[in-house]
Image: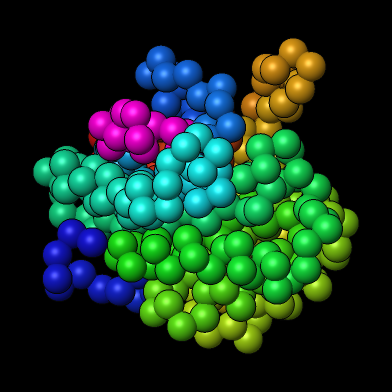
Amino acid sequence: MTSAAAPSFAGALAAGALVLDGGMSNQLESAGHDLSDELWSARLLAERPEAIVEAHLGYFLAGADVAITSSYQATFEGFARRGIDRERAAGLLALSVALAREAARRARAGVAGRPLWVAASVGPYGAMLADGSEYRGRYGRTVAELEAFHRPRLEVLAAAGPDVLALETVPDTEEAAALLRAVRGLGVPAWLSYSVSGGRTRAGQPLEEAFALAAGAEKVIAVGVNCCAPEDVDGAIATAARVTGKPVVVYPNSGEAWDAGARAWDGRGTFTADRVTGWYAAGARLVGGCCRVGPEAVTAVARALRPPSATAR
């Protein structure tokens, strides 16, 4: 937050829409960093932390209110495969929050006193596997096993002092149930965000069923979708708002498609600021972008949700 007098994150969310940042990986790649590694952007926590600060800073100055940390693919298991021991891995997880805080500190002069927030990213189990299973779910693990996987890093991230935990890109209800159990008692609010295709999770469960899991979870202050096509957002907002009564979080991809064979993005982007006012009207209160959504698009989102005088230039 920008000062001790700033409201809580939940309070700020209740007061109006907040603008999320865009894709971390495309920001880092555009700056010339190679992310062709199982750790993805999390590798730079150890090797180039200043690059992560600069990526966050770019989004804050573009108009984002919330920075999502670079811990999406940062796990004890993933770091261990690179020879990083548990103590060092815990330090890197905590560092991801500190780097976002540092970017907020540097950005304050350029955002006219606007409160800035940090969301600690908690990616799905499949992100650690780095084999694409995060977009399929159904890992063959029990809810208890998934809870045991997520809880230790959630504890470290919560202790690092983020404003909110971003339980994101969740592909199925089993992992959502595990995360909702793992987040209990940490003293930090969370949002729960599914990766979806049409009106179902990536694993094929109806969104009504998926969102209902979070309806009674007190510490979950928003539910929604991310890392999906912009076209999938409208129906998800309506369902999430109706089923849970909570504010909705949405941060889709650009709309381009990933060509696994060519290892490149293909097609035309469909993420436009014209969609944002409709999303807000339907109940979205946390709005930003995921893969391939950069600072220019975040500025457009901010202009759609805030008066021009309040938007960073």
Q: Nearer the viewer, residue 298 or 178?
A: 178
The answer to whether residue 174 is left or right of residue 166 is right
**Rendered-image quadrant of the C terminus:** top left
| Image spot of residue 44 (x, y percent) | 39, 32
* Residue for point 72% across, 36% down: 131
Is residue 300 within the magenta segment?
no
| Image spot of residue 6 (x, y percent) | 20, 70
Q: Nearer the viewer, residue 2 or 268?
A: 2
| Image spot of residue 176 (x, y percent) | 68, 67
**Would you say residue 134 is visible in this rendering?**
yes
| Image spot of residue 183 (x, y percent) | 52, 74
Q: Is residue 166 above or below residue 99?
A: below
The answer to whether residue 297 is left or right of residue 217 is left
Predominant SS along the magenta part: helix
The magenta stretch spans which residues?
41-55
**Would you say residue 271 is visible in this rendering?**
no
**Rendered-image quadrant of the N terminus:** bottom left
Q: How many marks?
A: 0
